[in-house]
Amino acid sequence: MGSIHTDHSERRTSEVYENRNNLPQTAPEASRTDGHIRFDIGDITKLEVDCIVNAANRSLLGGGGVDGAIHRAAGPKLLAECRTLGGCQTGEAKLTGGYNLKARYVIHTVGPVYRKDDPRCEKLLYSCYRNSLELAKQHGIHTIAFPAISTGVYGYPAEEAAAVALAAVRRWLAENGDYGMEVILSCFNERMYEIYRSVSGKN
Ligand code: ADP
C-alpha cells in the first residue's frame, strides 16, 4: 500500500508544480511531500486539483482574503450557487461547483474567529479540515487543497493553526488510508510555508 501511495503522491507533485504561480525560481524547493500531504506556496485558485477549500464566512456570500480570491477566479456563478445554500455553521462544510476555476469543486468551510484560551476554537478548526475531507470523499474527490483556515482576518496564530491542520489531516488520512486522497496545504507566502515545515517536524 505504501509504495502505491508514494507513487501517486510523486506523480501529483510534479503535475501541480507546473501550475503553481509561475515562480520557477522557487518551484524546485517550494513543494514537498509528507505522505499524502504536500505543501505548496502560491495562490490556491491556480491549482489543478479536484477541489479547493474556501475559508468562507457563515453567510457563504463572499468576503475578503482567500474567499474573495476564489469568488473572483470562479466567477459570478459561484456566488449564485452559494446563495442557494443557506449559509454554513462554523466548523461545517458545503460543496459547490468550481465554475471558472481549474478545480471542479469548491468546498466552503467556516473557520472559527480566534479567541485566546477558548478550547472551542481548536475543535472547530479541526472540524473544518475533517468535515471538508469527509465531504470530499463523499463526492469522489482525490486531490484537495486547503488554505490556512482562520489564519488571516480570523486571527488564529499561524503556528497553532498549522498544528491543528496537520493533526486533522494526518488523522483523517490514517483512517482512510485505502481511499487515495492527496492533500495540498496551500501557503500564500513563505512564512506560512516555513511554519508548516517547522510544525510538521520534517525540516
Ligand atoms: P480567515 O477569515 O479564515 O482568516 P483569510 O482569507 O483572511 O481567512 O485567510 C486565510 C489564509 O488564506 C491566510 O493565511 C491567507 O494568507 C491565505 N490566503 C489569502 N489569499 C489566498 C490565496 N489566494 N491562496 C492561498 N491562500 C490565501
Image (tube, rainbow, N blue to C red):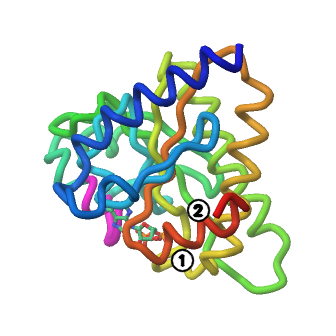
Q: Specify the quadrant that holds the N terminus.
A: top right
In the image, 150 versus 95, the foreground residue is: 150
Q: Is residue 26 magenta?
A: no
Residue 69 sits above or below residue 134 on the image: below
> Residue 127: where, in percent of width, then height?
71, 49
Q: Residues within 10 Å of mark 1 (few under 14, many from 20)?
A: some
Work out how far the residue at label 1 is from the one at label 2, CA to CA, in angstroms.
Answer: 8 Å
> Residue 157: where, in percent of width, then height?
63, 80
Q: Which residues are magenta?
A: 62-70
Mark 1 vs ligand 1: CB under 8 Å?
Answer: yes
Residue at image mark 2: 111
Q: Disc number at residue 14?
A: none
Q: Specify the quadrant that holds the C terminus.
A: bottom right
Residue 83 sits above or below residue 114 on the image: above
Residue at image mark 1: 154
Mark 2 vs ligand 1: CB under 8 Å?
Answer: yes
> Residue visible at 15% across and 38% down?
100
The overriding secondary structure of the stretch rendered in magenta is helix
In the image, 83 versus 174, the foreground residue is: 174
